[in-house]
Every structure is written in structure tokens, then in C-alpha cells.
Image (tube, grey):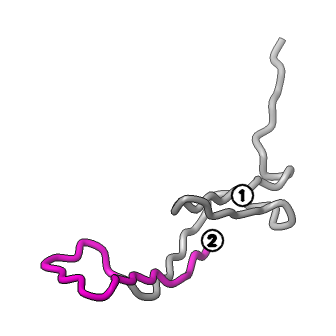
Amino acid sequence: LRIAGERRIAYGEGISLHRVERRGGAFDRTVSLPVEIDQERASAGFSDGILTIELPRLERDKPKKIDVG
């Protein structure tokens, strides 16, 4: 999974800052996943500053249930 983007920080005119906790600029993160993903059903959304990613497993990679009797 790769997430890349750019964080833009804009301050109005006449604003004086003494300390900035978060910086702007480009970012790029790569995360290895322990299972195979169904790329056709993968989705992502961004709302209120939160990125939500849904990565469903491939059917063949899901754990199998075995009834013991």
C-alpha cells in the first residue's frame, strides 16, 4: 500500500507564528500488507481530515473455517 500526497498549510496575512508543530510539504509512505488484497474492491475516502481506506482480502486468502464434530 502506498500513500502519497501534499499537505498545504496556508496562513492569512498579518499572522505571526512563534512555533509550528506540523510542517507542510510532500509525503510518501509505503506499507507492506501481510495478506493479498482484492484490488477491484479496494476503496478510499477523505472526510473531515481523516483518510479511510478499505482493503478487502482476496477470497482465496481468507482463513478457512473447519467444523470439528
Q: Position of residue 52 (x, y in %)?
A: 62, 58
Residue that sits furthest to the front in the current view: 14
Nearer to us in this view, 16 or 23: 16
In contact (CB < 8 Å): disc 1 and disc 2:
yes
Q: Is residue 18 above or below residue 50?
A: below
Nearer to us in this view, 2 or 69: 2
- Magenta span of residues: 1-23
The amino acid on which the numbered mark 2 sits, given as a three-letter code, is: Leu
Residue that sits furthest to the top in the current view: 69
Q: Which residue is mark 2?
A: 1
Can you tell which quarter of the image residue 3 is in?
Answer: bottom right
Nearer to us in this view, 17 or 4: 17
Work out whether mark 1 precedes mark 2 in sequence or the reverse, and give the earlier one: 2
Q: Is residue 20 above or below residue 56?
A: below
The label number, if any, that marks residue 18 in the structure image: none
Is residue 57 shown left or right of residue 52?
A: right
Q: Which residue is mark 1?
A: 55
Q: Position of residue 50 (x, y in %)?
A: 54, 59
Q: Can residue 9 be found in the magenta stretch?
A: yes
Q: Is residue 9 above or below residue 41?
A: below
Residue at position x 22%, y 76% from top? 20
Quarter occupied by the C terminus: top right
Q: Can residue 6 be found in the magenta stretch?
A: yes
- Determine the secondary structure under disc 1: loop
Can you tell which quarter of the image residue 19 is in?
Answer: bottom left
Is residue 31 shown left or right of residue 17?
A: right
Residue count near mark 2 (Cα–Cα under 10 Å), binned few <14, some 14–19, many ≥20: few
Residue at position x 50%, y 84% from top? 6
